[in-house]
Image (cartoon, helix red, strand yellow):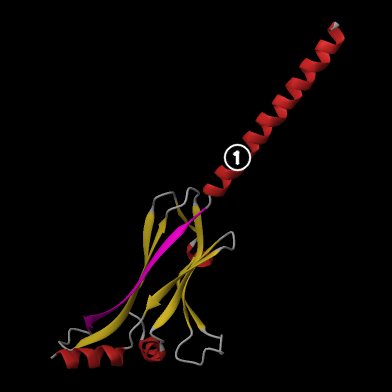
Amino acid sequence: MDAETILKIITAAVAVWGAITGTIALSTQLLQLRRDRTDLKLKPRMTIGCSIDKGVIEAIEMIDFDVEVVNVGRRVARIEEIGIHIEGKASPRDKHGVNIIVFNGKEDGVFSLQEGEKNVFKLRRWAKTLQDMAEHFADEETVYVRLTSGKQYNAALRTLSMSKARAAREKAN
């Protein structure tokens, strides 16, 4: 074999080796990118608490909502909006509903969660009109978290109307 043929074989071998290692590196990067996505876990909770109005002993029951958001992904989650989508006891065909905003990034500024961080967003002591609205909740509503990227995470929220809470309390006594 002459030097020119050996040089062509070495060049071809280096090209094949480069193609193989480049493909492996690209595949590794794609898999890493796939694993590095933002991933949120939501833990919504509805509670009925009491407060005293203007020093009067009579307790007024109020609804509170907590949404615990945990970033279990590897990327920063930039939260734009957190809300509760209420479909109510309407027919399942009626997909209209009401969104009750728990956190609004447009007004309060975008909220960022780093990897492994959690935060609890609260909606406390609703007004009387919203208390009345709670009577029309279905047994399960939807909590959503919308990121600035447009991705939305949903979780089921078990709800209880004030009248059902009173009935359960009376039944227990």
> Which residue is at 85% across, 12% downward?
5
Looking at the rendering, the stretch of residues picked out in magenta corresponds to: 38-52
Inspect the magenta stretch and tell me whether residue 45 lies in it: yes
x%, y% of residue 139? 38, 85
Q: Where's the C terminus, which quadrant?
A: bottom left
Left or right: 153 in relation to 49: right
Image location (x, y in percent) of residue 101: 47, 74
Q: Amino acid at mark 1?
A: Gln
Q: Nearer the viewer, residue 51 or 155?
A: 155
Q: Work out whether residue 85 or residue 102 is closer to the camera in this orientation and state it.
A: 85
| Residue 171, placed above or below residue 145 | below
Residue 65, image x, y percentages? 35, 74
Q: Quadrant of residue 8?
A: top right
Q: Tell me the residue that label 1 is attached to.
A: 29
x 19%, y 89%: residue: 169
Q: Say left or right for 57 vs 147.
A: left
Reply yes or no: does residue 117 show up in magenta: no
